[in-house]
Amino acid sequence: MALIVQKFGGTSVGSVERIKNVARRVAKWKAAGHDLVVVPSAMSGETNRLIALAKEVQPHCDPRELDVVASTGEQVTIGLLAMALMELGLKAKSYTGWQVRVLTDSAFTKSRIISIEDEHIKSDLKAGYVVVVAGFQGVDAKGNITTLGRGGSDTSAVALATALRADECQIYTDVDGVYTTDPRLVPEARRLRTVTFEEMLELAGAGSKVLQIRSVEFAGKYKVPTRVLSSLTDPALPVAEEGQAGTLITFEEDPHMAMEKAVISGVAFQRDEAKITVKDVPDRPGVAYAILGPIADAHIDVDVIVQNVGHDGMTDMTFTVHRNDYTKAMKILKEQVQPHLKFRELSGDERIAKVSIVGMGMRSHAGIAAQMFRTLAEEGINIQMISTSEIKITVVIEEKYTELAVRVLHKAFELDQA
Ligand code: ASP
Ligand code: MG
């Protein structure tokens, strides 16, 4: 008998019929002798609808009140799911975040979980209940309702699994696992049976949107075995089979598996990027800070950063930001940075994309970068910027080549072959 936390995404609970299917799936695991804590998101589209309502009333929503509104979607699904479970003859009980007491900080709309009280849940499990807990929401020390950021119910589930020392956290979603790349772009993309949490973090950071990145950080920090799998399969699929489905996020690399494992696990991409170049700034200490400090103060995330080798006491700096932040970043540079730094020129490009290859295997293989650059060169794709980590190589290219780049890299690293 195991303790399993199962999370169901918005699509999986998107209608009454689907909620009933989730209940069947949960009942099947319960019948196999397991203890279940179930974490649903709001019905698909519901959180968007709630946020839009709030904005209609108050365009710049008060964050505390926005969380009061946005968190209600999950209160609906926990109640409905508990009822659906009862209709199948199970004992079930739902809890909102504040009823459990999922304690968070007070950063409304993007709170972080501090601790979870588990007394209610544990005693209910002991009494044979399936416990249904609202994802995405918590409460701060003063009793204010908080939410964990969009997609936050993944993090709720992993955090609950950590607090309860669950044997596994199963994230049911509308895809059947983590893929070598987006199958909509590359039909040959394959599902990975396992992926290390480090790879998962890099893939998520590089644009693969299977799990909220914070949930992956959580799973990695606390080593919660986490499995991503489909909620769209037949709910009657035997537990033994379903328990092996999808993609398992792993921690320590088993040396046998490492040998079998491909050098590269996936190709990720992000289209909505923009590039900014500040030309001819004095090449002296503090310049990077003078440029990027005000950008960071405005809560703009900067990603790839390149500084040219200095020439005649001058240098250039180029960095990428999300396209939504482009105008704001340019304005800050013109109005706040230029008066002090007196750079000669500011230029930008809103039509760029980032393409990354990710894999634990590249740590022990030379020549991976060369192979990546050759593959792109053969297609005439110009690389504008490069950045690397231990297990990731990212290039910035013209946006129109995104699809081509992803396809040729996927093939070059034989990701289409099992
Ligand atoms: N319902 C929330 C959202 O749409 C949380 C989640 O789905 O994970 O962002
Ligand atoms: Mg979601």
Image (cartoon, grey):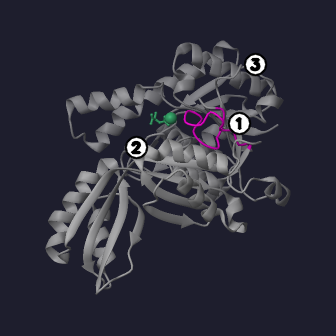
Report the side of 393 relative to 161 (left or right).
Answer: left
Residue ID for mark 1: 246
Q: Amino acid at mark 1?
A: Gly
Span highlighted in magenta in the image? 176-193
Where disc 1 sits, the SS reads: loop
Q: Residues within 10 Å of mark 3 (few under 14, many from 20)?
A: few
Answer above or below: position of 412 versus 289.
above
Task: Point out the image quarter for the C terminus.
Answer: top right
The secondary structure type at the circle numbered 2 is strand
The one of 190 and 32 positioned closer to us in this rendering? 190
Image location (x, y in percent) of residue 94: 56, 28
Q: Nearer the viewer, residue 85 or 209?
A: 209
In the shown orientation, is residue 207 left or right of residue 49?
right
- Earlier in the chain: of badge 1 and badge 3, it is 3
Q: Quadrant of the N terminus?
A: top right
Residue at 59 percent across and 37 percent down: it is 186
Residue 139 visible within the image: no
Q: Any magenta on residue 186?
A: yes
- Dominant SS of magenta comes to loop
Q: CA distance from mark 1 to mark 3?
A: 16 Å
Callout count: 3
The residue indicated by pointer 2 is 146
Which of the two discs, 2 and 3, labels the residue nearer the N terminus?
Answer: 2
Q: Secondary structure at mark 3?
A: loop
Is residue 36 shown left or right of residue 155?
right
**Label 1: few (<14), some or many (≥20) within 10 Å?**
many
Q: Position of residue 371 (x, y in %)?
A: 63, 60
Q: Amino acid at mark 3?
A: Ala
In the rendered view, tell whether residue 369 sits above or below residue 172. below
Left or right: residue 295 compared with residue 22: left
Q: Check disc 3 and report the residue beneath it.
A: 236
